[in-house]
């Protein structure tokens, strides 16, 4: 029987329930912005190339700012930075829409998109650091990170759906404006929820190093493992629409993503209900091997029905793997620089997803959708070989 006592214990705290609930709204743009900007620019300029440049500028700025913002938060706390970032991000998205609407040209679009990425508020990072720094039992911390991984994954699922609904209601500009509204309303709500106070105090007496958490060998290896896994995720993600297109029915994409995502969310929540005996690097090893087998099964599926079944099987490992990676990094990172460590994780996750999707697109274009899935299996196999190199820690 499923033991939900760890979740009941965790969410018996009313303030914590409010914090987690308030964190969802400002994070929906995680799954909306890149797609919304791409469609907005493509619609206004008629060029997918320009759209790619603009969304790339946004993602590049996001990757650049994350570690810097994380270090500022570790040194000064989150109170003075979250609301200004939200205001800057909202303004920059409005500027993108204005530039597209008035045809101001590519430099304006690039600059405003870069600014939007530079000011994205790090709600997920603050929440993960809060869970790491808070006084919790090991089972509560594991449950907290499991819930966090499910919320983030839900944002990646709901984001494109909200963009699609905005397109039906009007245009891609509506999607970008909706994302701006979520940040403008959601971040102040999150800031008032108690999350910033629960993040704790700055550890002013802690020893600092210019490399921050990267000075710790275990942190560097854990982040490299995250990058490998993210590349596998990207390869797997791009293969799904490639398979649907090959079947002549693009509407199957939603079905396949649901087949991957629903088992992932369920398995992630189940994973968070108990403490597992093996150290985290061994748990991660088992999860990436599962994904390697699942991606291979998807590549060999001869029909739509069997491909969907393979998606169901593969999806079972995503949620537990994301949770275990967060727990591992949190255990290895020094408490004084844990926020920066999680921002590095976010940066490498985004870079890995982008690299995997690019590589998967090349493989699918040259050799078909199955090549992208075999590439995903190879990436996960490589991650499995590397995972024992990360120091063995538990979710304590």
Image: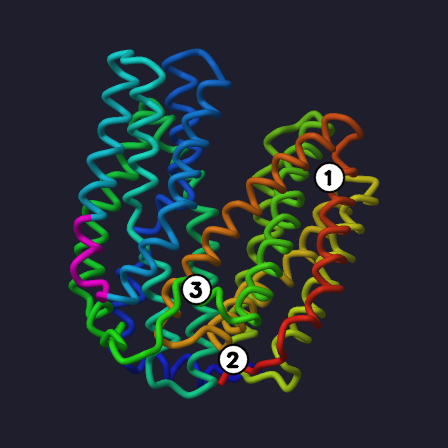
Task: Assess disc 3: are there few (<14), some (14-19) or many (≥20) residues with their C-alpha within 10 Å of its C-alpha.
Answer: many
From the image, tell me which residue sits under label 2. Answer: 273
- Which region is colored magenta? 76-84
Left or right for 188, reference 35: left
Q: CA distance from mark 1 to mark 2?
A: 34 Å
Q: CA distance from mark 1 to mark 3?
A: 30 Å
Q: Position of residue 325 (x, y in %)?
A: 55, 67
Q: Which tag is nearer the camera, tag 1 or tag 2?
A: 1
Could you say which is closer to the camera, residue 247 or residue 376? 376
Q: Are marks 1 and 2 in contact (CB under 8 Å)?
A: no
Q: Is residue 81 shown in magenta?
A: yes
Q: Which tag is nearer the camera, tag 1 or tag 3?
A: 3
Query: Upstream in the sequence, badge 3 or badge 2?
Result: 2
Which label sits on residue 341? 3
Q: Is residue 46 shown in magenta?
A: no
Name the colouring of the figure.
Answer: rainbow
Q: Which tag is nearer the camera, tag 3 or tag 2?
A: 3
């Amino acid at each position: 029987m499923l033991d939900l006592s760890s979740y009941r214990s965790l969410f018996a705290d009313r303030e914590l329930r409010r914090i987690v609930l308030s964190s969802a709204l400002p994070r929906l743009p995680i799954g909306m912005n890149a797609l919304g900007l791409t469609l907005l620019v493509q619609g206004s300029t008629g060029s997918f190339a320009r759209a790619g440049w603009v969304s790339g500028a946004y993602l590049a700025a996001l990757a650049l700012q994350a570690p810097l913002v994380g270090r500022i938060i570790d040194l000064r706390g989150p109170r003075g930075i979250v609301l200004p970032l939200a205001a800057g991000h909202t303004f920059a998205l409005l500027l993108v829409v204005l530039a597209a609407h008035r045809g101001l040209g590519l430099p304006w679009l690039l600059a405003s998109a870069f600014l939007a990425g530079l000011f994205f508020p790090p709600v997920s990072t603050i929440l993960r650091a809060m869970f790491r720094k808070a006084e919790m039992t090991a089972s509560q911390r594991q449950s907290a990170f499991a819930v966090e991984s499910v919320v983030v994954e839900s944002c990646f699922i709901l984001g494109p759906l909200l963009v699609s609904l905005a397109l039906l209601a009007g245009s891609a500009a509506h999607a970008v404006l909706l994302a701006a509204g979520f940040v403008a309303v959601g971040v102040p709500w999150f800031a008032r929820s108690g999350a910033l106070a629960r993040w704790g105090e700055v550890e002013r007496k802690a020893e600092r190093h210019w490399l921050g958490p990267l000075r710790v060998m275990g942190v560097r290896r854990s982040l490299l493992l995250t990058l490998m896994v993210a590349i596998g995720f990207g390869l797997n993600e791009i293969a799904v629409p490639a398979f649907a297109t090959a079947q002549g029915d693009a509407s199957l994409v939603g079905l396949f993503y649901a087949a991957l995502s629903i088992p992932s969310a369920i398995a992630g929540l189940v994973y968070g209900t108990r403490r597992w005996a093996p150290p985290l690097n061994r748990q991660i090893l088992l999860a990436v091997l599962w994904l390697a087998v699942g991606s291979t099964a998807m590549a060999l599926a001869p029909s739509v029905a069997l491909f969907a079944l393979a998606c169901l099987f593969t999806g079972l490992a995503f949620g537990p793997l994301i949770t275990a990676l967060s727990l591992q990094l949190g255990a290895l990172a020094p408490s004084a620089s844990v926020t920066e460590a999680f921002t590095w994780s976010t940066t490498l996750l985004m870079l890995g997803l982008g690299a995997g999707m690019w590589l998967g697109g090349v493989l699918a274009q040259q050799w078909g959708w199955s090549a992208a899935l075999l590439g995903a299996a190879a990436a996960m196999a490589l991650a499995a070989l590397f995972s024992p190199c990360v120091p063995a820690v538990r979710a304590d």
